[in-house]
Amino acid sequence: MKAKGSLGKRLAFESLENRLLLSTTTTSSTNWSGYSISTGAGTVTKVTGTWTVPTVTASIAATYESTWVGIDGYGTSTVEQIGTTGYSKNGSTSYWAWYEMYPAASVKIVGMNVYPGDLMSASVTYVTSGTYAGKFLLQIANMTRSNTFHTYQSLSSATRTTAEWVVERPSVNGTVSTLANFGSQYMYSCTATVSGTTGAISNWNNYRINMVSGGTTLASTSALTTSGSSSSFTVTYVSSGASSSSYVSSSLLSGTKLTSLVSNTPSDNIVNDTVSADVTDVALPTNVIDETIPNVWEDSGFATHKLSDFSESMIESFDTSVFGRTAQHEAEAADSVFASFGAELEVNVL
């Protein structure tokens, strides 16, 4: 779950009434949204954070959302992290807790059940004395279910330069995954310990990270709120980052809503009155077609519509000849797709 973002300019300290005025720099990452602080090498010894496991919207294609706290990762080659993940595929969802000592693979925490709405608290600590000196203590507690986990792990190449509080679309089998629709994620009681001092994120120069891919914002991060020695913020889902099909859009019918689907028969009532056009085919992105109704539509010259343009009445009017499946099965599949996948569908217009 390594960061792909890059460090911007180093922040300047400004003096105000003999105090350091600390600054926030807004930046972006293709797979992270949240906050990071960057300090001197070997200075970060602890990071903590609390969050509620968000409900991820059920999807047909695989989608992921991970929330975690960790040391290192932003501009470094290692990450020592622990958190939770929400996952969906084929209309089902699942949740789990995990830890990771990147570049090693993440490890699912066996015996810790995680469900939407569960209150989680996590920390990563670099142990400086005693039996486990030189190791990282990774801890997570499901406070809703009175379940805790901890492990001591070693990573000699860790620089302990940064601390993070992140919502992520993780890499799966070497590829950055599609972001699940998680609504919003509120992280609070966020603290770091740097050079022996524990404080809020705002105690240090920090980076406010928005998740952006190909110019499209996938998740946005709010400004920090600091109360006492801890900070809080919210990450809000914007877009899935799902790959669209290989078809090139010839035009965009903004605001068009499909009201029915027909097979091989152009029909004026396929679109509402806002657009006067005949529609012969509808295609979902290839990553959805592969899992639902392959080899049904193959025409090019498509105009893009959001899945949210579908309505319940359209689902109910699906013609079985379009799909070669029962109306009930197709309605169930399409309902899951249009309501929750968050990708794009495309419509061929004559």
Image (tube, helix red, strand yellow):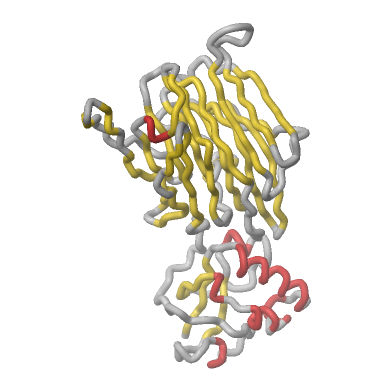
Residue 286 versus residue 79 in the image, above or below: below
Q: Is residue 149 above or below residue 278?
A: above
Residue nearer the viewer, 101 or 105: 101
Q: Residue at x 58, y 54 (%)?
A: 182
Q: Measured along the vertical axis of the image, is residue 164 above or below residue 252?
A: above
**Residue at the spot x=22%, y=31% of the render?**
16
Provide residue 336's location: percent of width, then percent of height: 67, 66
x and y percentages locating residue 270 in the rendered image:
56, 87
Looking at the figure, which quarter contains the N terminus?
top right
Residue 125 seen in this snapshot: yes
| Image point (61%, 19%), residue name | 153
Residue 54 horizontal side relative to residue 214, left or right: right
- Residue 42: image location, x then y, percent: 42, 16
Indicate the quadrant where residue 27 lies.
top left
Determine the residue located farthest toward the top in the rendered image: 130
- Number of numbered discs: 0
Residue nearer the viewer, 335 or 10: 10
Can I make out residue 103 in this image? no
Residue at the spot 45% in from the left edge and 88% down from the top edge: 274
Q: Indicate left or right for 132 with 250 as reference.
A: right
